[in-house]
Image (spheres, helix red, strand yellow):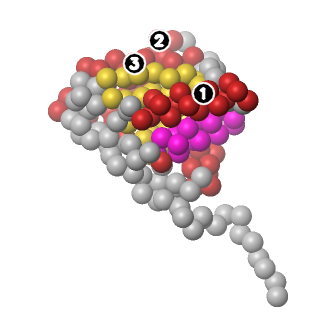
Amino acid sequence: MTIILDPTASLVHDIADPGPPAGDLQGRKIAIRIDMLWRSWDWVSEIWAERLRTEGAEVTFWRSCGRTGEEGEQADREYQALLAQSDMAIVGLGNCGSCTSWTIADALTAAATGIPTIAVATAHFEGLARNLAKRGGRSGLRLHILPYPLDILPKEQVHDIARNHYRSFLRDFGVRSGLAEQSAA
């Protein structure tokens, strides 16, 4: 008997559904997961947080740092506690191989709690992000793609990109609110 293995096969338990949409932002608690490397993601998430707050959301940032040993265990506990207090999660930035891996891992953790979740990556790492989500059993994970390269750009240009992407980010996240719909028009 010959067994043929297909490395592109989907997991039997794959979740192709993106999960619940973000819906209305008014009064919702949003966790934004940032990392220790990409200042451009700090700048994008600052702009988006400002706009999300304008639409009535409460935004909390959590910075991912040490991921191994005791420091990693503490980080996992902090992240789990944040997710338990949040109504939705925005996770970024997939902008290199390891950062994309951690972004998707943290997004999968958030999505597994049942809250609306979206991962953010740059265009160069979109394929990796989608493959990692699929390999993690959640091919339908919401993903928003920003241009690449992003981190080498000046702050003002990154702010412009953040503003220009905000409406499409809201659509990708499944946001439905008065201000969001007005800004998307």
Tell me which numbered mark, 1 or 3, is placed earlier along the sequence.
3
Q: Which mark is residue 75?
A: 1
Q: Residue at x 24, y 28 (%)?
A: 27
Q: Secondary structure at mark 1?
A: helix
**Stretch in magenta:** 93-111
Amino acid type indicated by mark 3: Ile
Tell me which numbered mark, 2 or 1, is placed earlier along the sequence.
1
Instruction: For marks 1 and 3, give the one nearer the viewer.
Output: 1
Nearest to the observer: residue 147 or residue 48: 48
Residue 104, relative to residue 40: is it above or below?
below
Amino acid type indicated by mark 1: Ala
Q: Is residue 102 in the magenta section? A: yes
Amino acid type indicated by mark 2: Glu
Residue 66, relative to residue 116: is it above or below?
above
Q: Is residue 175 left or right of residue 41?
A: left
Q: Residues within 10 Å of mark 2 (few under 14, many from 20)?
A: few
What is the chief secondary structure element of the magenta stretch? Answer: helix
Tell me which numbered mark, 2 or 3, is placed earlier along the sequence.
3
Classify the position of the N terminus by image quarter: bottom right
The residue wearing badge 3 is 47
Residue 10, relative to residue 90: is it above or below?
below
Nearest to the observer: residue 104 or residue 51: 104
Instruction: For marks 2 and 1, give the one nearer the viewer.
Output: 1
The residue wearing badge 2 is 156
Q: Residue at x 42, y 29 (%)?
A: 31
Q: Secondary structure at mark 2?
A: helix
Q: Is residue 155 in the magenta section? A: no
Q: Is residue 117 visible?
A: yes
Nearest to the observer: residue 184 or residue 84: 84
Q: Is residue 12 left or right of residue 44?
A: right
